């Protein structure tokens, strides 16, 4: 004759099962606000980010770009920031960043929108938004969403790149629209 488990044991087993079920269902996208220590911006990233700095050559202007990025499966969410020596070179730097990223995936730009503004309170600012498709050197089809921004001497690249079938517009919009710079 089988005996039923003690109510305390049954509750413990139920609790353990619930914990395992919740752990298995943890969301891939755990959005968190990140504030840069190197530049005046904040952004939402889907996982704990890594930050590194490296020199980049933007059409003959060599500068140090700080990148903060996180990855979900094969999709990268990244924001880069740098300071150009002269605000007049910021627009050219945005174009160079956009061109280099599209070239990295042997891409074609599907859509592009540019804006520029000058005001006494914010100085010179401009932005370029793109959607591009292409293939990595390994032959994987990729989609790239880029938001390139300049404000005086500060330049930023905010990008989402990954397999086109895995990148959702909702996650792209959440990431890119969360970018705020002072």
Image (cartoon, rainbow, N blue to C red):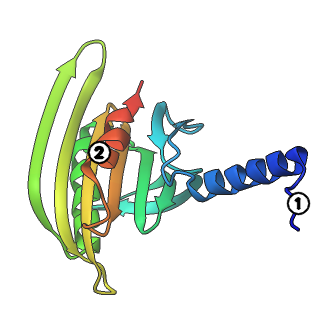
Q: Is residue 57 above or below residue 106?
A: above
Residue 99: quarter of image: bottom left
Seen in the image, is 84 located left or right of residue 89?
right
Residue 129, percent from left and from top = 19, 46
- The residue at which mark 1 appears reads as 3
**Secondary structure beneath label 2:** helix
Which mark is drawn over residue 39?
none
Residue 88 rendering spot, x and y as whole percentages: 25, 38
Quarter where residue 134 is shown: bottom left
Q: Nearer the viewer, residue 20 or 129?
A: 20
Using the image, determine if residue 55 lies above or below residue 87: below
Instruction: Check whether the beta carbons of the residues at disc 2 and disc 1 lie within 8 A of each other.
Output: no
**Real-space CA distance between mark 2 and mark 1, rounded to the nearest whole angstrom:** 52 Å
Q: Residue at x 87, y 55 (%)?
A: 5
Observer-nearest residue: 5 or 133?
Answer: 5
Q: Quadrant of the C terminus?
A: top left
Please give the name of the residue rendered at 29% of the width and 57% of the height, measured from the top-left corner.
Answer: 97
For the N terminus, the quadrant is: bottom right
Q: Name the side, left or right, on which 21 lies relative to 93.
A: right
Q: Name the residue tied to disc 2.
A: 170
Q: Position of residue 123 (x, y in %)?
A: 28, 22
Find numbered disc 1 in the image and state the secondary structure of the residue it sits on.
loop
Q: Residue furthest bottom?
A: 138
Q: Residues within 10 Å of mark 1 (few under 14, many from 20)?
A: few
């Amino acid at each position: 004759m089988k005996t039923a488990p003690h109510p305390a044991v049954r509750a413990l087993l139920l609790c353990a099962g619930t914990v395992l079920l919740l752990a298995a269902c943890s969301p891939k996208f755990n959005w968190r606000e990140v504030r840069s220590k190197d530049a005046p911006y904040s952004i939402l990233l889907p996982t704990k980010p890594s930050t590194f700095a490296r020199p980049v050559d933007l059409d003959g202007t060599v500068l140090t770009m700080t990148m903060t990025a996180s990855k979900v499966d094969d999709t990268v969410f990244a924001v880069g920031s740098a300071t150009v020596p002269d605000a007049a070179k910021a627009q050219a730097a945005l174009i160079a960043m956009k061109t280099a990223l599209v070239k990295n995936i042997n891409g074609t730009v599907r859509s592009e929108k540019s804006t520029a503004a000058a005001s006494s309170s914010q100085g010179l600012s401009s932005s370029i938004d793109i959607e591009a498709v292409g293939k990595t050197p390994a032959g994987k089809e990729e989609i790239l969403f880029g938001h390139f921004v300049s404000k005086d001497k500060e330049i930023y690249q905010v990008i989402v790149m990954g397999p086109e079938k895995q990148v959702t517009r909702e996650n792209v919009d959440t990431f890119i629209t969360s970018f705020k710079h002072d």
